[in-house]
Amino acid sequence: MKLDSKIPKGNLSEKWDNRKFEMRLVNPANKRKFDIIVVGTGLAGSSAAASLAELGYNVKSFCFQDSARRAHSIAAQGGINAAKNYQNDGDSVFRLFYDTIKGGDYRAREANVYRLAQLSGGIIDQCVAQGVPFARDYGGLLDNRSFGGAQVSRTFYAQGETGQQLLLGAYAALSRQIHLGKIEYFPYHEMLELVLINGHAKGIVTRNLITGEIKTHAAHAVIIATGGYSNVFFLSSNAMGSNASAVWRAHKKGALFANPCFTQVHPTCIPQMGDHQAKLTLMSESLRNDGRIWVPKSKETAKKLREEKIKPADVPEDERDYYLERKYPSFGNLVPRDVASRAAKEMCDQGLGITKNGNGVYLDFEEAIGRLGIDVIKSRYGNLFHMYELLMGDNPYKTPMKIFPALHYTMGGLWVDYDLMTTIPGLFCLGEANFSDHGANRLGASALMQGLADGYFIIPSTIGNYLASLGFEKVNADHPNFEKEKQKVLKQIEKFMSINGKSTPDEIHRELGKIMWNHVGIARSENGLKEAIKQIQSLRKIFYKDLKVTGETNNLNETLEKAGRVADFLELAELMAMDALNRKESCGGHFRVESQSKEGEAARNDKMFTYVAAWEYAGENKKPKLHKEKLTYENVTMTTRSYK
Amino acid sequence: MKVIRFIISHSLTKKYIMALTGLFLITFLVVHLIGNLLLVIDTTGAKFNEYSSELKSSLFIQITEFILIFGFLFHVTDAAILYIKNKSARPVKYHVLKQGENIKLSSNFMYITGILILLFLFLHLYQFLFLGRILKSEILMHELVINAFKNPIYLFIYLIWLIFLFLHLKHAFQSAFQSLGLYHKKYTNIIKNIGSIYSFIVPAGFAFISIYLYLN
Amino acid sequence: MTINVKLKIWRQKNAQTKGKFETYVMENINIHLSFLELLDELNEKLIKNDEIPISFSHDCREGICGTCGLFINGRAHGHLRGVTTCQLHMQMFKDGETIVIEPWRARAFPVIKDLVVDRSALDKIIQAGGYMSANVGGAADADAIFITKGIADNAFAAAKCIGCGACVATCKNASAMLFTAAKVSHLAILPQGQCERMRRVRKMVDEMDRNSFGNCTNTYACEMDCPKNISIAHIARMNREYLRSVLT
């Protein structure tokens, strides 16, 4: 298999226009003859379904939640970037492109990222037309803030709930098309298998989560927009239901999986407080603008803090280690996410952690309250402090917050070409589920931008090019492949129900999370990764021997749903470890302890690893095959990030 | 017929009718109270008698009375329809429901206060409208009223009734404005305050008159 | 620190069968556990005992997706103001307390299983008109329309609705007015929403009526139990908008 990224010819700024002109079109009158399946209703899925239906295609939209509006895009807090230069501070399409490429540590495709920056402005226009209530100033113009260490203010926001407002905008557009009869809507449906006919994606198999009915759906093309796979780690900031089953099952059907080891850890989450914790809650990164991060200098003090024998206030100033300020004097507490996360883990690994299980550092506002006054702090972070107090029972105005990094976003995903088509013809992948735009590290406020660019602007153009190559005949679900895949799904469900062991899916998932966090988490080593692969393989065996699922198959059964998702996580986890093992360099969110500078900073190996690692599924328990897509940088020079 | 069907089949139109008829009845109560004050101003009862005979003969008043009856019937029928619809919107009840924690007493018991007000109203109408106007039109109104309020049981029931009226009005006044969409972040508080004063003063006024008549 | 609690939970196999309460005793509960994590723990026990775990809706567990929603001790999302069920923590409960957990109750929200109800009626209200008909591609520059901060903030305050259905659950009439009004109001406030303003409110309210919700009797319970503190001022605005559309 040869990977063809189909990057158009021409100057960077002309590539997208050139591509659009090259593409074949579907006549407006013929669009209604094509059916398209869209799986997932987050920013990418909803926006794609809505804009395709607006064009006249017949769309079927699927989500496992009870409503399209629940998708986890809703939880994004910070904002959405756009190169509008409304603040007159020197922003431009090229600067946004440059920042994104650099932020991604030179592991993303130039052409894709440039297109993303080009489309960013149009997203804001579209969202405003839909009624998204972005923050405004008193004069009536849109307000911006600077985010994630960017030197320009290009982030549009709606208080701390930007993701929610954007998703509700896309959901509204989706709802409108449902009302107009252009979208058939399937909430409470989970995609469990992809159906291929002659190598082309032609449909899916779903389970109705309420009735348990297994059903096949046929279409001319399938779009997967089911988000990322942070939940491989069990504890993450993702929603409980977020899963990788759709992408993983497509991968097993032949879609290559790119850069699975590129995961992003968010430094300011509320730490784990007990074994039964189900998820981690994110606190906005903006807290680091005024908070100072520290741990005690001595292990003895840390031990006393862990056992709650003393309070943080009892630790005198000269016994505190403000380690980010010490290590990175020029950026201090504002270093990028990956650097801050790694430093926190390092401190805790040295036995300096301050929560009961040793995984936590302080985020202290005492100095800021002294400098700015309590009212300023309240106006800036009041709602976050309130949320923290609800969760932890501590008052952050009086005692420092406890924070720890948590898995937050996955840059890797299904490999797609410039048209967002996977290696399976007719199967497209959008949003966090694909790998395309963030390289090895995503910048703050860029995820929302990518999801909407893919859905509103890119797929409506590119899918036509594929559909125009097909005939107008209706695709029916009576092809034998549909029945075959359906039987496969039924068999798997039967298998889960019949093992009748002792471990619940959650227990096994929790175990997997521990393996992943310890070995494929913030810092990764060759030995650790090899160990992880071994452990994952044996855990997978335990899963198929010792799983326990109760309840019925023809009723709502969350344990059964979870079993299927964990089965996929257990396979994906191994691929992540393998990819991490293969990439013997540190870049962005991927940190290999063997590859660091003298000062302990991440060291890239551009000579060896300036490529996208795309993995081909080779069969059960067989080593997947690696394909490399070489990355070339013609418009930017590759530099080393430094925050000293 | 079409209009009525439209009103009945839409939730918000029912709300408007409730509010409009309610406001109409609220206005009527003020007029009624002012009329009754004649009982206190002129203890001989001459003015009051004059006033009540005027009520009987004036065409204008008769038309207004007709509208009043209609408004009242609308208010009650609408309430009954709403009640049935609202009850059927929750066929299975909660096992534990701490409604008192999140709403005010007066708003929770509008139906009950409404029904109690209605029941006594029949007595009230029988006593003064039916007996006074239709059957024994030669008895002077003043005498009829004095006789009624000299009876301590009647007075007691009347006063209890006024408490229910107070509770009903307390919610009704501001609620009517809310239903008609007349909400303003600055001025709604003024409406609320007027509502509170109104809902107290009107029943208190009636109570004062009745106690005054009893004592004199 | 740990506490013991008794849970009285509604169990119902599906929409067709009748349900009943079951009692479960949970001992030595870490007070840092969230309320839903307590249910997770209970479910794990049930599975190990060969029993069917309790179904309850949840997803983001940080109070924004609107999936979770339980009627806890007689209040929607529990007794605290401005929080969702998933934001409740065990430290908010007393040692030895009996906690009664019921599903949202409304004709428009039929029970699917145990504590899970079908809230698709809310989706239908949005589908009927809760949007601006703005196709992708034709939008003008975002700063072409001036919207002053006050208007933007007011629209945002209405747009914050997470569609959890607590307003319906807590309303004694199971009315969806606050939900519907939040969307009507959000779009009616903004200048972009003016074109479809009259049509929108008619279509949304009529759809609401078709879905067997009750009527609003201005008790304002919804405002008290709304996890996003959405004001009943929006209901007044909807009443005004609808009245205007009926009269014109």
Image: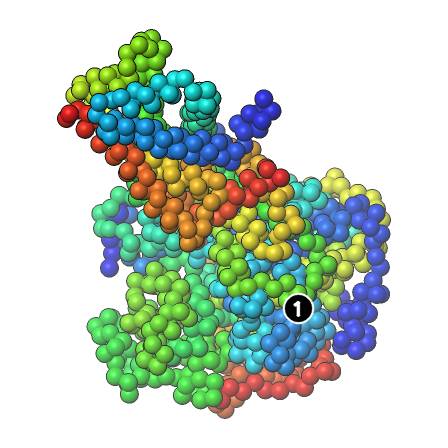
Horizontal and vertical percent position of residue C154: 50, 57
Q: Quadrant of residue A446?
A: bottom right
Residue at 57 percent across and 52 percent down: it is C187
Residue at 51 percent across and 42 percent down: it is C239
Horizontal and vertical percent position of residue A91: 64, 79
The answer to whether B132 appears left or right of A536 in the picture is: left
Res. A339 in view: yes
Numbered disc 1: secondary structure:
helix
Which quadrant of the rendered structure holds the N terminus of chain A? bottom right
Residue at 23 percent across and 78 percent down: it is A314
Horizontal and vertical percent position of residue A538: 49, 61
* Chain ID of residue with mark 1: A
Instruction: Please tell me whether residue A115 is drawn above or below residue A471 in the rendered image.
Output: below
The crowd level at tag 1 (other Cα within 10 Å; few <14, some 14-19, many 20+) is: many
Residue furthest top in the image: B135
Instruction: Please tell me whether residue A509 is drawn above or below residue C103 in the rendered image.
Output: below
**Residue pointed to by mark 1:** A120
Residue at 30 percent across and 35 percent down: it is B202
Q: Quadrant of residue B152?
A: top left
Res. A293 in view: no
The answer to whether A517 appears left or right of C243 in the picture is: left
In-front residue for pair B197/C132: B197
Instruction: Please tell me whether residue C54 is drawn above or below residue B158 in the rendered image.
Output: below
Q: Which colour scheme is used?
A: rainbow
Tell me the kind of residue under disc 1: Ser
